[in-house]
Each structure stands twice: as C-alpha cells, then as structure tokens.
Amino acid sequence: MTLFNYLPPLEPYLHILYQDDDIVVLDKPSGLLSVPGKAKEHADCLQSRVQRVFPSATVVHRLDMATSGIMVMAMNKAAHRHLSKQFELRQTEKSYQAVIYGQPSSDSGEVDLPLICDWPNRPKQMVDSKNGKKALTRWQVVSRSEQSCRVDLFPVTGRSHQLRVHMLSMGHPIIGDRLYATSEALALGKRLHLHAKALSFSHPGSGVLQQFNSEVPF
C-alpha cells in the first residue's frame, strides 16, 4: 500500500555540481527520494538517476525526501569506504538552512536531545531521554520576519529527522513540514523549508579538503 502520493520532480532531472574518478556531488531537489523505497512506484530516486549515468556510484549518506541540497556519492569501493568513515567519525562538516515558525527568544543556541523512532507512527522520530540516541544540533538566526525566522543549522550528529524534531522541540517547527509542523506552520510553505547548503570533507583520493555549496531555493 502506498503511504504517500510520490510525484518526484523531473526538472532538473539530475543536477551534478562536481564529478571525478572518486566522487560525484549532487544537488538533490525536494520531493525526490535519496534511495529507492520498498514499493515499486518509489523506485525513482537520486541513486537510480545517478547510476544511469555512472553505474558504479553508491550512496554514502542520505537526505530526507522533502529536504533539498548537497549529497556526495562514491564512484568506487575505496572512495565509499573512505567517505563512510568520515561521516561515521563526524569528520565532515554540514550546514543547513531552514525557515522555522515563530521567533526564538535568542539569536543562537543548541539542542541536545536524544532521539528514537516513534515506532507506531514511523517514519516519525521523537525525543526520548531514556532510550534515544544522542543528537546535537547548533543553530544561528539569519533573519527574522513577522511569522517566521530563517536559521542556519549545524548538525553535530546525523540522526534521522534530527533537525526537524529538534526545531519542533524548541516550539518552532520547520515551515512546510508535513510530518511535524502545526497547521499554521504547514500552511506557510508548499514544501519543507530545509536545505543542505554546504558540505565539506576530505577527498578520498587526494586527501585535500573539499567544500561544496548550494544556493538556498526558498
């Protein structure tokens, strides 16, 4: 049974920011799965689109379907091992931008709340101080408007839905979040206002620090 009406964007079909013998860096649009879903109608995804051009490419990390922005894929097994280790050891640096509902009382801060799958309501996640896995997000206000606030988000850990649940825990859900937003916050955006705008890591071949940036589309 299909749990959602999956209509992945076709334009642009594939946005490649950079490619060499070891890596391919992509700008994923909102609404496209990173990897195939279990249902056959969920087969279209960033992985399958990339593999039509580069059959050896493999996914190293993921973005939520509704989140847009930078992803890196490995072009060979050695590069995959190298990149996976960097993500595992938190040697990569990631920054996101979001528009959240309401106004935080300060201009910066951090959310240190452990997360666990909300099993009866999966794929939703929830805060669980007893059984959850450690999750830490730092945030910084970029600008404020009447009903919302633009923030830069810096996840120290990489839990599923971490940024979305951490913003919700502050009382400021991300605009357009169909899983976690209040009706008021949902009404302000046709898409999830969350974008992976920058990613840096050591190149698996040369060891040189690579930094990639993507313009925020909202």
Image (cartoon, helix red, strand yellow):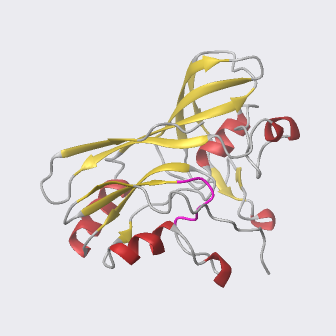
Return the residue found at the far front.
11
The N terminus, quarter of image: bottom right
- The answer to if 30 sits in the magenta stretch is yes
Direction right: furthest residue: 183
Residue at (40, 77) in percent of width and height: 52
Q: Nearer the viewer, residue 16 or 3?
A: 16
Q: How many marks?
A: 0
Q: Is residue 42 left or right of residue 211?
A: right
Camera-side residue of 61 and 51:
51
Rendered residue at 76%/17% (across/down): 146
* Residue 165 in view, yes or no: yes
Left/right of residue 215 with respect to residue 115 in the rendered view: left
Report the residue at 47% width, 75% height from top.
48
Predominant SS along the magenta part: loop
Front residue of 41/171: it is 41
Magenta highlight range: 29-34
Q: Is residue 78 left or right of residue 173?
A: left
Compared to residue 69, the image places residue 139 above or below, namely above
Q: Residue at x 24, y 45 (%)?
A: 210
Residue 39 shows in the view: no
Residue 124 horizontal/vertical position (percent): 72, 58
Give residue 150's quadrant in the image.
top right
Q: Position of residue 4 (x, y in %)?
A: 77, 68
**Picture coordinates of residue 190, whole percent (x, y):** 74, 45
Residue farthest to the bottom, as pictured? 40
Q: Residue 134, percent across and down?
A: 55, 48
Residue 162 is inside the magenta segment: no
